[in-house]
Amino acid sequence: MSRGPAGHVARSTVRPNSETGRCAPLRTFLTTADGISIDSVYEPGDVVYDASGSPVRRPVFVIAHGFTGDVDRPHLRRVAAAFARHGAVVTFSFRGHGRSGGRSTVGDREVLDLAAAVEWARSLGHARVVTVGFSMGGSVVLRHAALPGRTVDAVVSVSAPARWYYRGTAPMRRLHWMVTRPAGRLVGRYGFRTRIHHRDWDPVPPSPVESAPRIAPTPLLIVHGDRDGYFPLDHPRMLAEASAGHAELWLEHGMGHAEHAAADDLLARIGDWAVARAG
């Protein structure tokens, strides 16, 4: 599985309402640079007014889900609702997940899916974009933010791996079986609505820990639970160390893995951080 070009064009027929200047909640398919159709949802979020009665321009949160997730999963909808209190929200299904086209490359070409979603958010009139990724999505937001010509204003990576091919925990050994074995890919397709590409990475994409030092000066937040069953605490610590002090690291007591484990109060704190850092 090879990396594609960073550039892309997101195709959509939707536009903001000409009378209000705001978009109603809408759903469409975007097209990535390599021609994959990505199921995407935009929600304008709560409207906040300043003392003069004018609406406050707030950021848009582009949320990248974990492996086997998709835009319709209840846990992703809960996350989207939490961030809608802080700004507009774009959610989407990575390739091979849900109603999106293509096959999952488990963190490689998914950077093109995120790039299409970010470009769509910009096209809807949002000046500030925050990417928030969970697990596999956490690795994707790191890789995307490290690309030349940065297009985001703040990055939040939750429960992400630091390095590829990690098999040090039982859940990750099961995941590798599902990705690398024909029988496992059948389980992914019919048990998790996730279609997985059969080819190995060629070339291997830059790892999250290789990407972390390239993100500065974009604000970066790394969040990880001390009860994460997939990736132990050496992963977030490696990411923070690689950032050379640029990243903020939150180690959350009692938290497990990714979207399912992100409590509402944590999501609220992440939203507050993002609004403050995105400028």
Image (cartoon, rainbow, N blue to C red):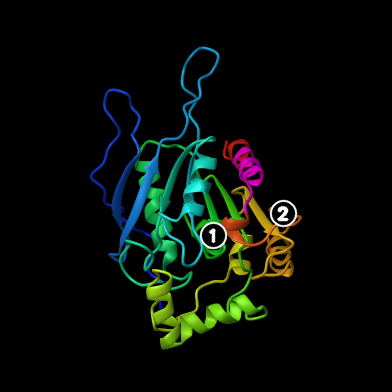
Instruction: Let me know if residue 150 appears in the view.
Output: no
Q: Secondary structure at mark 2?
A: strand
Give the CA separation, mark 1 to mark 2. Answer: 18 Å
Q: Viewed as shown, does residue 202 lie left or right of 234?
A: left
Please provide percent x and percent y for residue 239.
Answer: 68, 63
Please provide percent x and percent y for residue 204.
Answer: 50, 78
- Mark 1 vs 2, N-terminal side: 1
* Pointer 2 local density, CA inside 10 Å: few below 14, some 14–19, many at least 20: some
What residue would you read off at disc 2?
249
Instruction: Please tell me which residue lies in front, 14 or 2.
Output: 14
* Pointer 1 local density, CA inside 10 Å: few below 14, some 14–19, many at least 20: many
Q: How many numbered discs, if any?
A: 2
Instruction: Please tell me which residue lies in front, 2 or 53.
Output: 53
The amino acid marked with disc number 2 is Leu
What residue would you read off at disc 1?
146
Q: Viewed as shown, does residue 118 lie left or right of 170?
A: left
Please provide percent x and percent y for residue 279.
Answer: 57, 35
Residue drawn at x 41%, y 87% is: 182
Foreground mark, 1 or 2? 2
Magenta stretch bounds = 262-273
Please provide percent x and percent y for residue 7.
Answer: 36, 59
Q: Is residue 11 above or below residue 182?
A: above
> Where on the picture, by quarter, is residue 241?
bottom right
In the rendered image, residue 26 lying in the magenta stretch gets the answer no
Q: Is residue 157 above or below residue 124?
A: below
